[in-house]
Amino acid sequence: MGKQDQGIAVSRGRDHVVPRTLSFITHGEDVLLLRGAPDKRIWPNRYNGVGGHVERDEDVLTAAVREMQEETGLQVRNVRLRGVIHIDAGEAQTGILLFVFTAQAMERQLSPSREGTLEWVPRERLSSLDLVEDLPLILPRVLSMAADEPPFFAHYDYDEDDALIVTFACHSTG
């Protein structure tokens, strides 16, 4: 199968997505979160997982592991896909496809991140932090998933007041 067989030419006018990863690294009962730098373009001073764009020459798993290494300096194990979220960001025919992962850190020693301040947070403190707006919904979900549990699927949209609308798929795979 060649490049032309991928059907991109006939996909003009359809939605296209930018692939990104978002990862939550744990060590014991703590979760590593990144508090965005005050001058960060998106989510300044808010807590989020680590992640970023999938490069052209990468699969999403490789991208997630690369982003975790680049942003934290940690070596991780048990990297698992926990969810796939299609985000309608309001741009005509362009959205985001977010791949959500979890991983376990083998140590706690962090490298500084230019993205912001990394912080190990006890799970019981998560609800008291200024989290990125979708994390109160997805973080408890991903942290409670069994090792062999299939990933969740969701869609994000925004209403006329720019408020986030989250819809989780409720289809059974069984």
Image: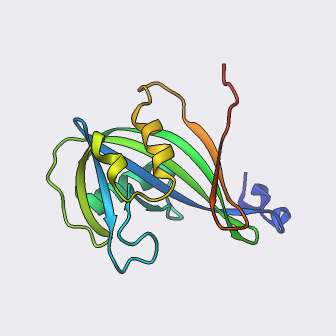
Q: How many marks?
A: 0
Q: Position of residue 163 (x, y in %)?
A: 63, 62
Q: Is residue 15 visible?
A: yes
Q: Position of residue 133 (x, y in %)?
A: 49, 57
Q: At 22% across and 35% down in the image, what residue appears?
A: 28
Q: Is residue 132 above or below residue 45?
A: above
Q: At 39% across and 42% down in the image, what residue appears?
A: 102
Q: Is residue 145 above or below residue 111?
A: above
Quarter of the image with the C terminus is: top right
Q: Position of residue 2 (x, y in %)?
A: 72, 57
Q: At 29% across and 40% down in the image, what residue appears?
A: 124
* Name of the residue lying farthest toward the bottom: 39
On screen, residue 153 versus residue 16, left or right, reads: left
On screen, residue 159 versus residue 24, left or right, reads: right
On screen, residue 47 versus residue 12, left or right, reads: left
Q: Is residue 74 visible?
A: no
For this rendering, which residue is in front, 86 or 134? 134
Q: At 46% across and 51% down in the image, what residue appears?
A: 135
For this rendering, which residue is in front, 171 or 8? 171
* Name of the residue lying farthest toward the top: 174
Q: Is residue 27 above or below residue 130?
A: above
For this rendering, which residue is in front, 83 or 155? 155
Q: Position of residue 100 (x, y in %)?
A: 48, 47
For this rendering, which residue is in front, 75 or 157? 157
Q: Is residue 144 above or below residue 79?
A: above
**What's the colour scheme?**
rainbow
